[in-house]
Structures are given as structure tokens and as C-alpha cells.
Amino acid sequence: MSTSASLNRSAAFASIAVALLLVGMKVWAVFSTGSTAMLGSLADTVLDLVASLATLAGVWVAAQPDDENHRFGHGKAEALAAMFQVVLISISALSLAFRAVGQWIAGARPEGAEGGIVVSVIAMLATVALLAWQRYVIRKTKSLAISTDHVHYQSDILLNLAVIAALALDQYAGIAGADPFFGLAIALWLGWGAWGASQQAIEQLMDHEWPEERRTAFLEAVARHPEIKGLHDLRTRTSGDRDFVQFHLAVNGDMTVREAHVVMDEVEAILKKEFPGVEILIHPDPEGHVDPTDMSSEDLLAKL
């Protein structure tokens, strides 16, 4: 197993362990306080647990080597796991919003704030420790699934702060409606988080191009080779922790196939040094050649 795969799995197992601990504590807190905000926090933690299990499955599948039916690897399993998490978060947000509105209308109030506050503080401490490990793993592996899981647990810090505020305001300050208000706020926060988390996963599933800054850096690296006369039809995409690039390079039309092949190898060596891990496919063209069916024949190096 690669180092990246081992780190991703360790982060997934850590999030599962933290989620199991927090689910048990928050179940007790919900029954002892009757708080909608605490119920929202519990619902989010249950979803964190399910999402972390999906993350574990995603990083495990993504780490599998290429096979005859998946020549580009299994990296998109991480994006699929991320989208599964987004669906769960969205369902949780809607359910919590309905309950908060119902509690507001009914005028129900929580009880036993002390226990709920203690549980929330412990939850925050455990979450901070998990976030620190996840940040380390993300820096090393750039995992989309772990990054999406990280977003969940970042929001948990705010969720637990909201629970503490809701219980304290309702029980100690006597502000009626504080608990459903914060419950509704948590639901909106979850919905916003689901929207944000979905964007990167959708881009990866739809083979979105690299950011313009990275594409420009790639072109500049190619342009440093003296034999290159032009480049067109650049296509880039990311799948899990792997990047794929393909493009056409124009060289002197008098070169033999062998000579052109040597130039392609030299260009590939330059790119692999500056963009390690990127899989590259180069198609050589004679200088001045234009494919009438090619919609991307513009020389990109001329823009540098």
C-alpha cells in the first residue's frame, strides 16, 4: 500500500472513531435536554459517521491499482464518496429545519443545559484533535474525500458553539426561542456546507480543466524546450490524487519519427520533474499542420 493510501485510511479510521464517541455522548445529551440544537448536532454527527464510512470506502477503492477495465485508475471513487456525503448533509439540514420550525411554533424549551454544554465542550476538543490530523493528511495526499470529511468536522466546531449558545441563552438568560433559532441556523449552515462541498466533487466527476494558473505554468515548462514550435489541444483533468494531461506538440516537419520521439521524451522529462505524478500523453505534429476537424488548433505557446 502506498504512503498516501495509508495516510488516507488512517484519517478515515480516526474520523470514524471520533464520530462513534460523539454519537454516544450526544444521544444521551438529546434525551437529557430535549434541545433541538443538540438534536441537530447529533444528526450532523451521525451523518459524519456515515460519511466517514463512505470516505473510508472511497479512499480504499481509489487506492486500488489500474486494471483492464479501469485504465485511468479508480480515483473518481473519492468524488463519488464526497457526493454521497453531500446528499446526507442536505437531508439532515432539511429535517433539522422542519423540527426547529415545529419547536418554535409549539414553544417547547430544552432542559438540563449543563449536561448538553459539557458534551459539546468534549465534542469540540475531540474534533480539534481530529482536524489537526486531517490537515496533515490533506497536505500530504490532496485527497478530495478526506478534504470533504474535513469540511464536515470544521462545521462541527461551529455547531457545538451554537449548541452551547442556544442552551445557555435559553436556560440562563431566559431567552425563549433561542434553541429553535440556533437549530434553524445550524440547518442553514449545513445546507451551505453541502453546496460548497459538492462543487469540487462535481468538477472532478465532470473532468473540469486545471486552474488557469496551473495550466500557464505547464505551458511555460513546455516552452523551455528549444525544439518545440507550438502546442495546441491541451486537455487536463484530475481523478482522485492523480492528474492526466494530453496535448499536441508541433516540431520541425523535417524530423524523423525517431528524432521527434526523442524530443517528446525530453519534454516529458521536464514536465515530470516540475509536475511529479502527472500522467502525460503527447501527440507530435509537424510544424504548420492544421487538422480541419480539430476545434482546439490555436497555438497556446504563442500567448505566453
Image: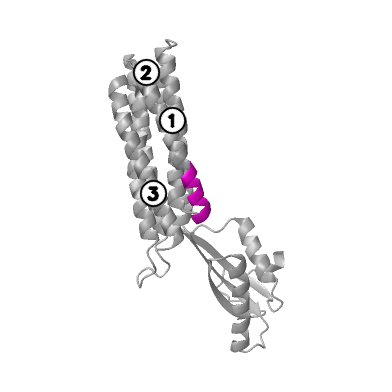
Q: How far across and how far down the image is residue 199, in percent?
A: 48, 47
Magenta residues?
132-141
Q: Nearer the viewer, residue 293 or 3?
A: 3
- Is residue 199 something one can see in this rendering? yes
Q: Name the residue beneath numbered marker 3.
A: 12
Q: Is residue 31 above or below residue 5?
A: above
Residue 136 counted in the magenta span: yes
Q: CA distance from mark 1 to mark 3?
A: 21 Å
Q: Quadrant of residue 225?
A: bottom right
**Who's the residue at 48% across and 51% down the image?**
137
**Residues marked 3 and 2 touching at CB (< 8 Å):** no
Q: Nearer the viewer, residue 210 or 75?
A: 75
**Who's the residue at 58% across and 75% down the image?**
292
Q: Name the residue beneath numbered marker 2.
A: 113
Q: CA distance from mark 2 to mark 1?
A: 16 Å
**Who's the residue at 40% across and 30% down the image?**
122
Q: Disc 3 residue type?
A: Ala
